[in-house]
Image (tube, grey):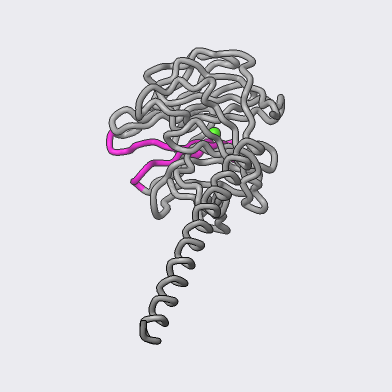
Amino acid sequence: MTSTCKFLSALFFFTRLLSIIKSRVYIVSLFVFFLNVFHSYAQETVIPEIIRKIPHDSKAFTQGLIVDEGIFYESTGLYGNSSLRKYNKHSEKLIKKISLEDKFFAEGLTLFNGRLYQLTWKSGVMFIYDKTTFEIIESLSYNGEGWGLTSNNKYLVMSDGSNILKFRDPSTLRVIRSIAITYNGLPVNNLNELEFVGNEIWANIWKSDLVACIDSTTGELVRWIDFSSISERNGAEDVLNGIAYDKVEDRIFVTGKFWNSIYEVSIQEQ
Ligand SMILES: [Ca+2]
């Protein structure tokens, strides 16, 4: 064997060795990554316990749910079937409903400063209503899609189906700040219906039974809640999509599109 051949053989041997080591390192790294994800999920995921069930209109394509002084307000979607609804205190009895024009697909809903704010999906229009009469006081415009909506005592917070939450000035909808939600370094997309619960923003993930609990100050995802044990989801449409928090009585309610019930739940640490 010539010295050139010996050199090439040695080079080939070391290249193969490096390749095997690299692939083993890759496999081990992948295993560690998934182990880490599984471990994180198990460690940071909590489950709900049902306290009571309240009947819910199974024809309601729920896009936003809030509760104020024990009264549920709901935004329902679909073109030609979008509405704003109000129910009797602590019950499913519908006491007020208005329909939106057929060209609007209603989305998230929140209460800010005594007024109801309702998003539309692709129209870029936010309707602001008198809470009692449901008269439109004003409509504002924004760029992009409207999905979920919630508010604290200062800002409206909107989702648009991405992993970004935008904090907006309630009087102009100007974006004040944005937070990008990630988990194990990956974006958490499909953030949908929202609800402030204390300093956290809870966001359900479209087409899943998971709710992400997000620190509204840092944007950190601090916990998952897995609602699969109570989910009424059977197909692609009837997904979890309503979170309401009664901050006076510290009560949590969840429902979904076309669900038969609104569930009052308590969240149990695992
Ligand atoms: Ca909500």
Viewer-proximal residue among 46 and 137: 46
**Quarter that holds the N terminus:** bottom left
Q: Position of residue 199 (x, y in %)?
A: 69, 43
What is the x, y in percent for residue 175?
52, 57
Q: Residue furthest bottom?
A: 3
94 lies left or right of 112: left
Identify the residue shown where x is 37% and y is 19%.
59
Q: Looking at the rendering, which quadrant does residue 51 occupy? A: top right
- Is 237 situated above or below 142? above
Please say if 46 is above or below 7.
above
The image shows residue 77 at horizontal and vertical percentages of: 37, 32
Is residue 141 left or right of 210 when viewed as pictured? left
Looking at the rendering, which quadrant does residue 97 occupy?
top left
The magenta-colored residue range is: 102-123
The answer to whether one can see residue 254 in this image is: yes
Residue shown at the point (42%, 34%) measured from the top left: 207
Residue 79 placed where, x, y %?
29, 33
For the point 49% across and 16% down, which residue is it?
Answer: 261
